[in-house]
Amino acid sequence: MKKIRPLLILLITLGVTASSPVFSQVNCKLLQASNAAGAMHASTTSYWFGVMELPFLFIAVFFAFMTAHALRGGKFGKGMNFMAWGFLVMAVGHLHMQIEHYYGFNLFKSVLGQISGSIAWFAALIVTWGLSGLGFYSIYKASKGA
């Protein structure tokens, strides 16, 4: 069986992605994307990514909790539980971002005000990253037998 080379796969993926005008930014000199091409693809692509993001994210959260429940505690289950809660906070944040993007309503800033709403948003990001990182670290330690 051939050895998989992740660096080669990463470089090929980045090359294909960087050469595609669909993923390029409007004013990016490196990719030589024109303003017209960027504007044409940005409106339809961002809408469909926004629409498709949420169901897949909530499915991932559902299966993260199901996996954590199936592991029934222990070091792996504890790590998966942390990750599931981090993913849930992330899913709620992404739902909030989509509502703000399409309807212009920011719940944090409406309820807490401009400064406190921004601080609450930042705290939610820290909680998401912290829980996910703690979960990955817990699973890593369990896989090492520590």
Image: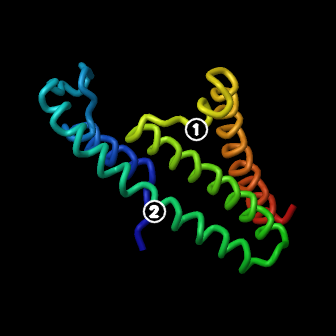
Q: Is residue 37 left or right of residue 55?
A: left
Residue under the point 51% across and 49% down: 95
* Label disc, if present, on residue 107 of the rendered structure: 1
SS for dot 1:
helix
Residue 146: x, y in percent?
A: 87, 61
Foreground of the two, 143 or 109: 109
Q: Relative to residue 12, is residue 60 depicted above or below?
A: below
Q: Which of the 4 image quadrants contains residue 21? A: top left
Amino acid type at circle 1 is Leu
Residue occupied by mark 2: 56
The residue at the far right in this view is 146
Answer with mark 1 or mark 2, whichever residue precedes in sequence: 2
SS for dot 2:
helix
Quadrant of the image containing the N terminus: bottom left
Foreground of the two, 105 or 127: 105
Amino acid type at circle 2 is Phe
The residue at the far front in this view is 111
Residue under the point 53% across and 63% down: 58
Residue under the point 40% across and 47% down: 10
Residue 70: x, y in percent?
A: 72, 80
Residue under the point 52% across and 47% down: 94
Residue 41: x, y in percent?
A: 19, 39
Label 1, residues with CA under 10 Å away: few <14, some 14-19, many ≥20: some
Q: Is residue 122 left or right of residue 28?
A: right
* Label disc, if present, on residue 31 of the rendered structure: none
